[in-house]
Amino acid sequence: AQLGLRSALISVASTGSLAANARVICEWLRAQRDGPLILVSVSKGGSDLKTALAHPDAARIFERVIGWVNLCGILEGTPMADWLLSPHLLARANRFVYRIRGRSLDFLTDLQRYPGCALDFPLTLPAHLRTVHVVGFPLHRHLRNGLARRCHTRLAAHGPNDGSILLADAPRWPGQLCPVWARITISVRRSASARC
């Protein structure tokens, strides 16, 4: 909007299942009559979009989409989901807090990382779709938020990470890779900010 471009928000549920959100994305794209379109996704939105791109009719569904900007998208699952669903005492305490606040963590099952998990398939793009993956890989000292620091530390054994995704995953993704050696803060509509 700041650049004078028309924009719209696809109403996916931030804690919705990948399958349900992929259906919403595909239905929204089928309803679009004007093009060309550029999609922008943040964090779990990358998982939703990867799942939509795996639709058997993706080439036709995405025919008006000429670009995708993937901002810190979780495209191969995250070890944080594995930990949050583990029997570890702190993980159980986190789940308890979410439950008493009325929030579901069911979506984490889709974000787990193991052979055969929901995101264990290669990202396939239609030939015409240009993609840019912006990935932030901060050092611990770049992080100011306590939760971000804890997530970063928890994944440190897996190598450089942003608290959710691993740097080692990114080179496998088709498209242009733009690594940023810092924390990325993105202002998004309907929320104060998304950090990765």
Image: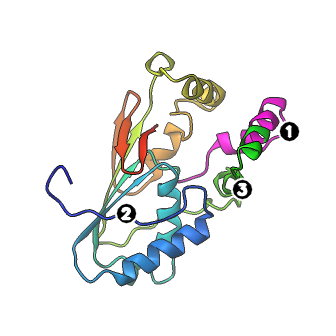
Give how far apart the Cα atoms at labels 1 and 3 are: 15 Å
Element type at marker 3? helix
Give how far apart the Cα atoms at labels 2 and 3 are: 23 Å
Residue, disc 1: 87
> Residue 16: x, y in percent?
60, 62
> Residue 18: x, y in percent?
59, 64
- On whether residue 175 falls in the magenta region, the answer is no
Element type at marker 2? loop
> Is 54 left or right of 151, judged from the image as shown?
left
> Is 125 left or right of 153, judged from the image as shown?
left
For the magenta stretch, what is the residue range? 75-95
Amino acid on which the number 2 mark rests in the picture: Leu
Q: Nearer the viewer, residue 17 or 61?
A: 17
Residue, disc 3: 106
Residue, disc 2: 9
Residue 39 image-quadrant placement: bottom left
> Residue 97: x, y in percent?
75, 38
Q: Nearer the viewer, residue 76 or 6?
A: 6
> Is 26 left or right of 68, judged from the image as shown?
right
Height in image: 122 above or below 135?
below
